[in-house]
Amino acid sequence: VNGNNPLCTEWILECVRYWALEMRVDGFRFDLAASLLRGQDGQISPDPLLVRRLANDPLLAHVKFIAEPWDCSWPDGYLVGSFPSGGGEQHRFAEWNGKFRDTVRRFIKGDEGVSLKGDFASRICGSADLYKDGGRGPCHSINFITAHDGFTLRDLVSFHNKMNSNNAEESGDDNNISWNCGEEGESVNPEVLLLRERQMRNFMAALFLAAGTPMLICGDEYGRSQGGNNNTWCQDAVNWFSWDACTAEEQGLVRFCRLLIALRKSHSELFAREDYERNITWNHDNWEDPYNFLSFILEMPQPKGPVGGLSDTASTAVGSPESFIGESVGG
């Protein structure tokens, strides 16, 4: 589909209007959205007609637009931080921040790199290096660890290699930036299992305490597994949500996830700011130390009215109930 052919653009626009106005869909995420920026010659346009029409359509002013800002062409199709605005007064498109996903995975996995610690700090603080100069705020960064394709959170800490043989095809990404914590796949080793639980809590904490818009895939809150399959488009039962498994984790990972969300909502002035002005103090000076440790203090901005104290303690190193103790979130 040539999305920037005027006839095709109008057709896409009418489809989006129908789903937004008639079916009351609140927002749209455009898969491989960089492909919608290409012209007849296959090159990326800096001002594509389709994006301009979507961003400035008055009937769609209330709709949320999210771009997966890449396509199958590298490197010209990788546009994280530079997806076009459409020329409107406000930048209408938020972006899946693939750099947040990759950096956080590498940091928590324990990869070494001279710039990794600084990159991780930038992602936690809202990715200003990607979005600030373009007039966007932290909310334009859709932060995520996992998505509908790729490993689930449980599989990210349980598999080094994809297990896609039941697809009867060669599919799925080989570069998952994953670590199995010492054993591949299912394990009964208590040390391995404890480490996997800790790593999942680490990922959850990084996701929900970072500036930006967090995205959590359904099932990660209880640790759903797909048996290491990272491309389950052709599967059925492996994709199902297990209410029994979710109930079993009610006082475990589900509780930790729920209280992290409550903490973020209770202190949105710290964790869900609309700008990059965070009063932050870093507790170390050596940014080139390969040890993946980051310590900082976030100071509460000037309150608009009387507020209570901040008395919540979260630890990813221990399980429930010690992993989360807090008054303001009812933990």
Image (cartoon, grey):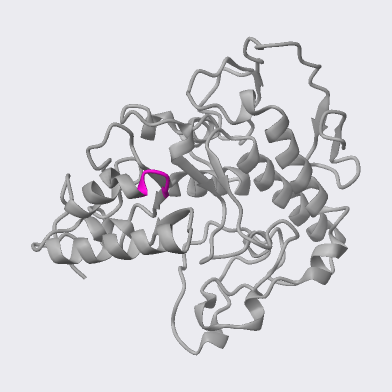
Quarter of the image where one finds residue 107? top right
Q: Residue at x 15, y 50 (%)?
A: 45
Quarter of the image where one finds residue 91? top left
Q: Residue at x 50, y 18 (%)?
A: 277
Q: Position of residue 132 (x, y in %)?
A: 37, 28
Q: Position of residue 15 (x, y in %)?
A: 32, 65
Residue situated in front as seen by the camera: 108 or 140: 140
Residue 3 appears in the rendering: no
Q: Is residue 127 above or below residue 221?
A: above
Quarter of the image where one finds residue 240? bottom right
Residue 215 appears in the rendering: yes
Q: Is residue 237 left or right of residue 168?
A: right
Q: Quadrant of the C terminus?
A: top right
Q: Find the residue positioned furthest to the front.
A: 22
Q: Position of residue 181 (x, y in %)?
A: 70, 58
Q: Is residue 188 above or below residue 142?
A: below
Residue situated in front as seen by the camera: 171 or 143: 143
Residue situated in front as seen by the camera: 102 or 285: 102
Q: Quadrant of the N terminus?
A: bottom left
Which residues fall within the magenta stretch? 60-64
Q: Is residue 318 left or right of residue 31?
A: right
Q: Find the residue positioned furthest to the right.
A: 321
Q: Position of residue 237 (x, y in %)?
A: 66, 82
Q: Is residue 222 left or right of residue 63?
A: right
Q: Residue at x 68, y 34 (%)?
A: 264
Please say whether residue 142 is one of the residues in the magenta stretch. Answer: no
Chief SS of the magenta region: loop
Q: Is residue 125 above or below residue 94?
A: above
Residue situated in front as seen by the camera: 126 or 188: 126
